[in-house]
Image (tube, rainbow, N blue to C red):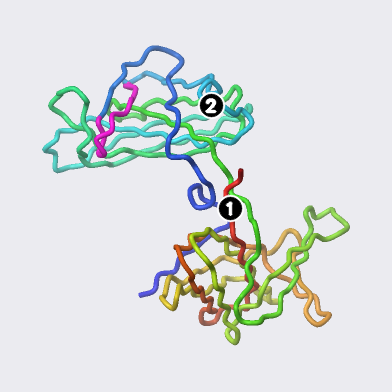
Amino acid sequence: MKSLILFYSFLIIGLFLNISIQGATLKPSNQKFKIVKISDENKKTRVYYHLKKNEEMVFSSIEDFIDDPNATYSIKVITRAKISPNSNSSKTFGIELSILEDGIERNKILKYKKGVSSAKKSSKSGFNFTQAGFWFDELKQIKDSEILIKLVDGSPELDVRILINKINYRLSDKTLMPVNKEKPYKVMYKEDVTDSTYKTSKDWYLLDENSDLQFKIFGPKQIRIFTRKIVDADTIGTYGFTLRENGKYINNYLYNAENSEKEAHFINDDTTINISSFNSFFFNIPDGVNYYSFESVENSAPILLKIQSYIDEE
């Protein structure tokens, strides 16, 4: 059965950002926590800090661990609990994560249920650690930011590690054209609803039950696929399309269509046609010459589609 995946315009870290694998490990600043060196599943020794009940681990002066205070950074919070190496069950644990950034505090309760892993202390100890619990977040304002971590009620003691990495955003370098000759449309929209003039987005192509689209793309490359639904007078609803790579089915994509708050529209034969706000996702193109076909799913409203390729920001 073909699965339907619901994508929103929210862009997920890792799909549209280039984050370096290596990063600095943050050190707690409020007190001296016990250092635990863990040999992980890849036989790499990593430094963790031991967190006990009723303790709060504070990470401040984060700017001391980075080289560009004006950049945006990802933080990766890793937690593990001790577990018997012969355990057949999982262990439940969790943390309260608070991030103070630019005077605003955001809080998360993170709970995990993890089984035993091959990770263990570098020195002989007789026990292993659970599989790691992960959480990614983002810091745009490094100066005076703080990260606070404490155990949730009922959690066992944990070992905590936080990595910080600079995010290198990707930039669009060009718009891709279909191999079949299709009429391009210009989408008009307002940057702000109070604006008196419209901005223009070029090279959108119509996708409906009578017209498929196909693109020839040289990889490796990352592309971003934008779509907008042509808005009916009576309904907004959902819309979707099928994506194929070199003739092979990839997936059906189903979107919620929302009214454009920026008065998005295009003009066809002197007729103004309203369209929804855009949805988008990123897709990685493998090496070589590849063909990508887009087909409207059954009962979908007509769609405008646009593809841009992306490069890493220098």
- Residue at 45% across / 75% down in the picture? 246
169 magenta-colored: no
Most extreme residue toward the right, as rendered?
A: 196
- Residue at 49% across / 75% down in the picture? 242
- The residue nearer to you, when weighing 309 against 60, is 309
The quadrant the C terminus occupies is: top right
| Secondary structure found at label 1 | strand
The quadrant the N terminus occupies is: bottom left
Mark 2 or mark 1: name the one nearer the start of the chain.
Answer: 2
Instruction: Give the foreground label among 2 and 1.
Output: 1
**222 sits left or right of 150 in the view:** right
Q: Which residue is mark 2?
A: 66
- Residue at 21% across / 39% down in the picture? 117
Q: Look at the picture and state if 193 lies above or below 22.
A: below
Q: Quadrant of residue 116?
A: top left
Range of residues picked out in magenta: 39-51
Q: Which residue is mark 1?
A: 311
- The residue nearer to you, when weighing 83 against 76, is 76
**118 sits left or right of 47 in the view:** left
Main secondary-structure element of the magenta-colored stretch: strand
Residue count near mark 2 (Cα–Cα under 10 Å), binned few <14, some 14–19, many ≥20: some
Q: Position of residue 70 (x, y in %)?
A: 64, 31
